[in-house]
């Protein structure tokens, strides 16, 4: 599935490719999030043609609750339901059980929870999230894991990690015993946990190396810990993770984070930041971060950057975009969401180009600093 | 400005064209509404390329309050501010003063009101709405009128109409004494009032014929009266209105209303129904009106109409569109708004074609009945 084409000389940045039955993915890659089956305020045509998204990420928790497995099966899976012909990764739903649902309760068997929509009761097990993702038909499915709070003590983090490992073994078994439903291949990724403790992180990474999955994710980071800790633990994990499999850092991050984590050997990312922050008026640009709601833009009657390939930057006066946000107009959300994803995917393309040409290692730190600046 | 190319033999349906400095408009025409400078959930590119909008309508009340005349002047007018190179019509703001603002008070001088946004106090006069529309730079500006409630008694309606007439004379004078600001022509339309009373309606139409404006609008209809009364009074007005000027029926309507009012001699329409109703899940189609929130679409895994030129109809399963609305997803609002405007403008194009080929008169009533049906 994964081919490693090159590793940088001074950093761990890698150039690779993943082969799925819905197309090839060049890594490092960023995956836009289609929570319930749509990137908020962005059309599928824009995703394919303007953002050049190579792969998108769907949330099993949301899609399991609505439209539900029965309708999803009748629709022929997620690709068919949402009209997306490229690759899709789905998470296991575990993270949302911990962040969104009510009255969740963990047992050896799985995670019981109440729907955040209607309070109905549900159980996610390592086995049934495989089944749900067979119905979704994602190209890459994730295993059920426990994502503990970042301030867990050592004992709690260890117990949680061990539960995640036992669930991982059950999940892999369920995966190997079942078949895809729609005639194309599906892959499964395990998830490294271990809280903020280095020895647990190392133990979990070694465990996941041996599990036989097609790729490995790093979970439980970017959950409230300082950014430097996230970088350090990512670095620690990629020292142990096999070079032969794709490495996916879950839920990260801002543009500067992507640069730093690619340098630490990460191949895949997903995050709602580009679209969620867009809806709050935060625009990521080559010159840094713009807050479009800031009054300084009210009388700025020029486009931000006529050379940037998004309409928000190249076509419209900043005063107009500011006006759209001040009036809570949907067009503002549309233009900003589209822009931020064009920026994210362009940044990943530039990283791939630079790794290929040995121009990444001496560039990324300065670039990260620039992209984090307030404009 | 206006050329009448043809009038139908059995109805009063007319084929015409308006020449503005931002392009020619073929009538009958529907104008999408860009309230504060954007059609809600629709991009300017979609307006031009997918909807084929020939002219759009901006609201002076909203644009005067935000961004305000100073910023609008600095931006170089509305075309430049919102990046729209086609024709624009702006209303006078009068209707919104009556429908949106607080503590409005009418005097001979004009309409005092408090902003619905921040409670600030303002005065619209027949003269200053001309000045505001000079700053907006619309191709067609409207006069300040009073739009009385449909249940006014005769005396109230008469007084209101007479005030509108006195304002119209002042407005025309202000228009003739001032110049466009941006180097292209602007036109001005008067507005027929007279409440629900036939003799007042006739008197007002005759008055507007003599005022010398480039076009004439029919106002004060579709404000709560029965549809049949609206048709009857429209018919009455177009019997008196000169054939030489374009006739614009303000704030109308549903697809069936457009058919009936074109048959009664109307050339121009505007309405928020296609976009507002789209956001509530009401989809206008050649087969009738679809409520996408209806549970019958939950398990309907086919597109609605593969031959209709909108993605909502041709590309996506109805179950997916239903799912988007159930989850309050922005993509649902986008697809439905775009679809309804494509439908509206396609309907106008079909009417023009049929008037031209003498196929309108025997068709429109049956078509109106069909389009009003619930699917």
Image (tube, coloured by chain):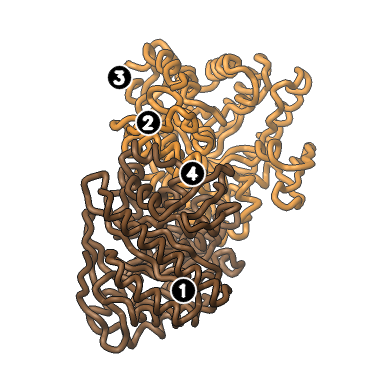
Chain colours: A orange, B brown
Quadrant of the drawing holding the N terminus of chain B: bottom left
Number of the label disc, if any, that sits on residue B194: 1
Number of the label disc, if any, that sits on residue A357: 3
Compared with B194, A258 (above or below) is: above
Looking at this view, is A338 or A161 the one in front?
A338
| Mark 3, secondary structure of its residue | loop
| Residue A130 picture location, percent across and down | 62, 45
On whether disc 1 and disc 4 are found on a single subunit, the reply is: no
Compared with A42, A243 (above or below) is: above
Q: Is residue B372 left or right of residue A167?
A: left
Q: Badge 2 local density, few (<14 within 10 Å), some, or many (20+)?
A: some
Q: Is residue A172 left or right of residue B281?
A: right
Residue assigned mark 2: A300
Q: Earlier along the polypeptide chain: callout 4 or callout 3?
A: 4
Which of label 4 and label 2 is nearer to you?
2
Q: Earlier along the polypeptide chain: callout 2 or callout 3?
A: 2
Instruction: Count the marks.
Output: 4
Looking at this view, is A113 or B361 the one in front?
B361
């Amino acid at each position: 599935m994964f081919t490693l084409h090159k590793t940088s000389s001074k950093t761990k940045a890698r150039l690779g490719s993943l082969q799925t039955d819905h197309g090839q993915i060049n890594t490092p890659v960023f995956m836009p999030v289609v929570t319930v089956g749509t990137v908020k305020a962005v059309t599928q045509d824009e995703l394919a043609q303007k953002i050049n998204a190579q792969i998108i990420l769907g949330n099993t928790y949301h899609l399991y609750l609505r439209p539900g497995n029965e309708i999803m099966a009748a629709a022929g899976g997620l690709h068919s339901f949402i009209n997306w012909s490229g690759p899709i990764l789905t998470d296991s739903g575990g993270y949302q059980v911990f962040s969104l649902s009510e009255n969740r309760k963990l047992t050896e068997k799985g995670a019981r929870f109440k729907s955040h929509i209607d309070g109905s009761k549900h159980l996610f097990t390592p086995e049934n999230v495989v089944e749900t993702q067979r119905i979704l038909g994602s190209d890459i499915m994730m295993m059920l894991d426990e994502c503990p709070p970042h301030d867990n003590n050592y004992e709690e983090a260890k117990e949680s990690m061990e539960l995640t490992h036992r669930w991982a073994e059950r999940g892999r078994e369920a995966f190997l015993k079942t078949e895809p439903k729609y005639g194309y291949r599906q892959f499964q990724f395990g998830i490294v946990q271990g809280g903020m403790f280095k020895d647990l992180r190392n133990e979990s990474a070694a465990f996941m190396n041996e599990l036989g999955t097609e790729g490995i994710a790093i979970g439980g980071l970017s959950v409230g810990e300082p950014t430097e800790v996230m970088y350090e633990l990512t670095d620690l994990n990629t020292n142990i993770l096999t070079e032969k499999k794709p490495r996916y850092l879950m839920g990260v991050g801002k543009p500067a984070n992507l640069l730093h984590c690619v340098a630490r050997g990460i191949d895949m990312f997903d995050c709602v930041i580009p679209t969620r922050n867009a809806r709050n008026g935060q625009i990521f640009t080559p010159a840094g971060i713009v807050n479009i709601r800031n009054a300084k833009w009210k009388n700025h009657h020029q486009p931000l950057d006529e050379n940037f390939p998004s309409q928000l930057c190249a076509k419209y006066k900043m005063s107009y975009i500011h006006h759209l946000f001040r009036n809570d107009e949907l067009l503002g959300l549309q233009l900003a969401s589209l822009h931020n994803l064009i920026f994210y995917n362009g940044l990943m393309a530039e990283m791939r180009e630079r790794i290929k040409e040995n121009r990444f290692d001496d560039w990324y730190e300065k670039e990260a600093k620039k992209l984090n600046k307030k404009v």
